[in-house]
Amino acid sequence: MLRSYDLLAARPGNNEKLWEQLFTKSDVDIISVPLAARMQFHPQKTWFKLARQRGVHVEIAYGSQCFESANRKVFLSNAINLVKLAKGGLGLIIASEASEAVY
Protein backbone atom coordinates (compact mmCIF):
# COMPACT_ATOMS: atom_id res chain seq x y z
CA MET A 1 0.00 0.00 0.00
CA LEU A 2 2.81 2.45 0.81
CA ARG A 3 4.24 2.30 -2.71
CA SER A 4 0.92 3.44 -4.18
CA TYR A 5 1.94 7.01 -3.24
CA ASP A 6 4.63 9.11 -4.94
CA LEU A 7 5.95 10.61 -1.71
CA LEU A 8 5.57 9.33 1.81
CA ALA A 9 6.27 11.55 4.84
CA ALA A 10 6.41 10.75 8.54
CA ARG A 11 6.62 12.84 11.71
CA PRO A 12 8.48 11.08 14.56
CA GLY A 13 7.40 13.22 17.50
CA ASN A 14 9.84 13.29 20.42
CA ASN A 15 10.67 9.57 20.56
CA GLU A 16 14.37 8.79 20.07
CA LYS A 17 13.83 5.18 18.94
CA LEU A 18 11.31 6.30 16.32
CA TRP A 19 13.72 8.97 15.07
CA GLU A 20 16.48 6.42 14.72
CA GLN A 21 14.17 3.97 12.91
CA LEU A 22 12.91 6.62 10.46
CA PHE A 23 16.37 8.00 9.70
CA THR A 24 18.18 4.68 9.33
CA LYS A 25 15.75 2.02 8.10
CA SER A 26 12.33 3.31 7.04
CA ASP A 27 10.91 3.57 3.51
CA VAL A 28 9.73 7.17 3.86
CA ASP A 29 10.82 9.95 1.50
CA ILE A 30 10.46 12.90 3.89
CA ILE A 31 10.88 13.09 7.65
CA SER A 32 9.02 16.10 9.02
CA VAL A 33 10.63 16.94 12.34
CA PRO A 34 8.71 18.76 15.08
CA LEU A 35 10.82 21.63 16.39
CA ALA A 36 8.42 23.64 18.57
CA ALA A 37 9.24 21.70 21.76
CA ARG A 38 12.62 21.15 23.35
CA MET A 39 14.09 17.82 22.26
CA GLN A 40 14.45 15.18 24.97
CA PHE A 41 17.51 13.67 23.24
CA HIS A 42 20.28 14.63 20.83
CA PRO A 43 19.83 13.42 17.23
CA GLN A 44 22.90 11.67 15.87
CA LYS A 45 24.94 12.95 12.93
CA THR A 46 25.12 9.40 11.54
CA TRP A 47 21.30 9.29 11.30
CA PHE A 48 21.35 12.27 8.95
CA LYS A 49 24.20 10.79 6.93
CA LEU A 50 22.37 7.47 6.48
CA ALA A 51 19.13 9.23 5.57
CA ARG A 52 20.90 11.41 2.99
CA GLN A 53 22.59 8.33 1.46
CA ARG A 54 19.19 6.67 1.09
CA GLY A 55 17.65 9.79 -0.52
CA VAL A 56 15.49 10.73 2.47
CA HIS A 57 14.94 14.46 3.02
CA VAL A 58 14.26 16.18 6.33
CA GLU A 59 11.54 18.82 6.50
CA ILE A 60 11.74 21.77 8.87
CA ALA A 61 8.23 23.23 9.08
CA TYR A 62 8.25 26.65 10.68
CA GLY A 63 4.48 27.32 10.67
CA SER A 64 3.07 29.02 13.75
CA GLN A 65 6.18 28.43 15.88
CA CYS A 66 7.79 31.64 14.67
CA PHE A 67 4.96 33.89 15.84
CA GLU A 68 5.10 33.18 19.58
CA SER A 69 8.26 34.46 21.22
CA ALA A 70 8.42 31.60 23.76
CA ASN A 71 8.42 28.99 20.99
CA ARG A 72 10.64 30.99 18.64
CA LYS A 73 13.78 30.55 20.73
CA VAL A 74 13.32 26.77 21.06
CA PHE A 75 12.39 26.42 17.39
CA LEU A 76 15.42 28.40 16.19
CA SER A 77 17.77 26.50 18.50
CA ASN A 78 16.45 23.14 17.26
CA ALA A 79 16.56 24.27 13.61
CA ILE A 80 20.16 25.48 13.91
CA ASN A 81 21.18 22.15 15.45
CA LEU A 82 19.53 20.22 12.60
CA VAL A 83 21.27 22.37 9.97
CA LYS A 84 24.60 21.61 11.65
CA LEU A 85 23.83 17.89 11.80
CA ALA A 86 22.83 17.93 8.13
CA LYS A 87 26.22 19.35 7.08
CA GLY A 88 25.06 22.88 6.42
CA GLY A 89 21.54 21.98 5.33
CA LEU A 90 22.10 19.19 2.79
CA GLY A 91 18.87 17.31 2.30
CA LEU A 92 16.74 19.77 4.28
CA ILE A 93 13.39 21.12 3.15
CA ILE A 94 12.13 24.38 4.69
CA ALA A 95 8.31 24.48 4.62
CA SER A 96 5.71 26.92 5.90
CA GLU A 97 3.27 24.25 7.09
CA ALA A 98 0.43 26.36 5.69
CA SER A 99 -3.03 25.18 6.66
CA GLU A 100 -4.80 26.95 3.78
CA ALA A 101 -3.98 28.27 0.33
CA VAL A 102 -2.96 31.91 -0.08
CA TYR A 103 -3.97 33.56 -3.35
Image (spheres, grey):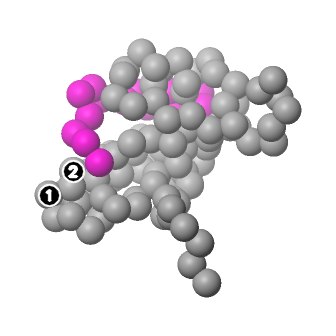
Task: Name the residue at 66% across, 31% down.
Answer: 28
Return the residue at label 1: 70
Q: Is residue 74 above or below residue 29?
A: below
Callout 1 crowding tier (Cα within 10 Å): few <14, some 14–19, many ≥20: few
Q: Work out whether 97 lies above or below 59.
A: below
**Is residue 16 in the magenta section?**
no
Question: Measuring 44% from the left and 41% from the top, which residue is drawn there?
Answer: 33
Segment tinted magenta in the rendering: 36-51
Foreground residue, 19 or 86? 19
Looking at the image, which is closer to me, 22 or 99?
99
Q: Return the residue found at the far front.
A: 100
Residue placed under numbered mark 2 in the picture: 74
The kind of residue on which mark 2 rests is Val
Q: Secondary structure at mark 2?
A: helix
Q: Is 44 included in the stretch rendered in magenta?
A: yes
The x, y position of residue 61, in whole percent, is 45, 55
Left or right: residue 25 compared with residue 84: right
Q: Relative to residue 4, is residue 46 drawn left or right?
A: left
Q: Quadrant of the C terminus?
A: bottom right
Q: Quadrant of residue 1?
A: top right
